[in-house]
Amino acid sequence: MILSAFRKSLPALLLCLMALPAARLLAAPKVHTVTLGPNRRVAYVPTDATPETKPDESSTLHIRALYVDDRQKEWTTGPLHDVTDRTFTVRRALRLNDALPSDSAPRWVWEPGPWLMVDRTTGHITALHLPDFDSTVSNVVWFRDYAAYCGIATTARGGLYAIVAQLGARRAVVQKQIGRWPQANHFIPVCQPAKWQRLPMRVTIQPTSGEATTYDVLGSSSLVEEGDNSDEN
C-alpha cells in the first residue's frame, strides 16, 4: 500500500522539482540600497595654487561617503545630479599621497576627482571619462544627461575648449577651442559656470578672461541604463 501511494505521488514530486529552476528565474532581482553619508570637512589646497594664489591653510573640502548596501564604496564631494529617476552623477573625492621620494612618511591630501555615475537599482558605479576633463579647471554643470564645462586638450593641439559631453555618446556634442593653454597667469576659476537654456536647448560657456559663447545642443538621450536583472548580488 505504501509503495502504491509513493508511485502515485512520484509524478507530482518530479513536477515540483522541475519547477524549482523556473521559480528561481522568475524571482525578483535584488534591489540595492545606495545612500550618501553626512558631510565632513577636510583640509584642501588646490593643486594649481601658487604662492601668490594659495588660499588660507584652513581651506576645506566637503566630502561624504557613498554606500551601496551599507558598504562604503567611494568618497564624494559636491551635490549629486539626478539624470533619471534611478541614475545620478556625483563627483569623486580622492585621497592622494603627496609625499616626495625624499619624505620619510606618507603625506595624504584630499582633491576633487573625476565624476561617477551611480545606478540606484543595481548599485553599479561607473567612472565617467569626460572628454578633455581637467579636475583643476573643469567646473561641470549638468542638464539632463549633458555635462557642460571648459576642458584642457592634452594632445599636441593644446588649448582651452568649450565642451558639452553626453552620457552614452562616444564623442563630445560640442568641442570648440575658446582660448590658448597653458596660460602663464590665468584666472581662478578659468571659466565661469556654464548657463543652460531648456527650449531651445542651448548652453553658454565663458572663460573668466574672455567673451561668452552660446552653443545649440541637438540630440536625444543616449543613456542606456542596465536591465532590472543584475549579476551583482
Image (tube, rainbow, N blue to C red):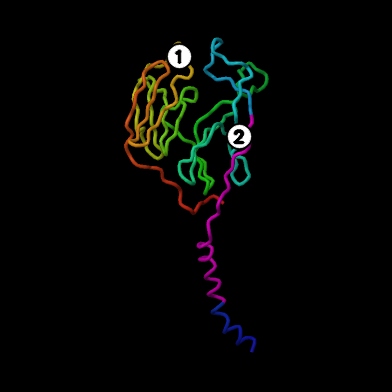
- Position of 194 with respect to 25 (left or right) is left
- Report if residue 31 lies within the magenta region: yes
Of labels 1 and 2, earlier in sequence is 2
Amino acid bearing label 1: His
- For the residues marked 1 and 2, what is the alpha-carbon distance in whole angstroms? 31 Å
| Span of residues in magenta | 13-40
At x 42%, y 15%, the residue is 182
- Position of 142 with respect to 174 (left or right) is right
Which residue is labeled 2 in the image? 64
At x 41%, y 45%, the residue is 224
Q: Nearer the viewer, residue 99 or 198?
A: 198
- Report if residue 177 lies within the magenta region: no
At x 61%, y 18%, the residue is 101
In the image, residue 73 above or below residue 29: above
- Check the image and name the residue furthest to the right: 104
> Mark 2: few, some, or many residues within 10 Å (few <14, many ≥20)?
some
Amino acid bearing label 2: Arg
Label 2: element kind: strand
Residue 214 location, x and y as percent? 34, 26
Q: Nearer the viewer, residue 122 or 150?
A: 150
- Position of 189 with respect to 77 (left or right) is left
Residue 46 location, x and y as percent? 55, 20
- Check the image and name the residue furthest to the bottom: 1
In the image, residue 6 above or below residue 127: below
Q: Which mark is residue 186?
A: 1
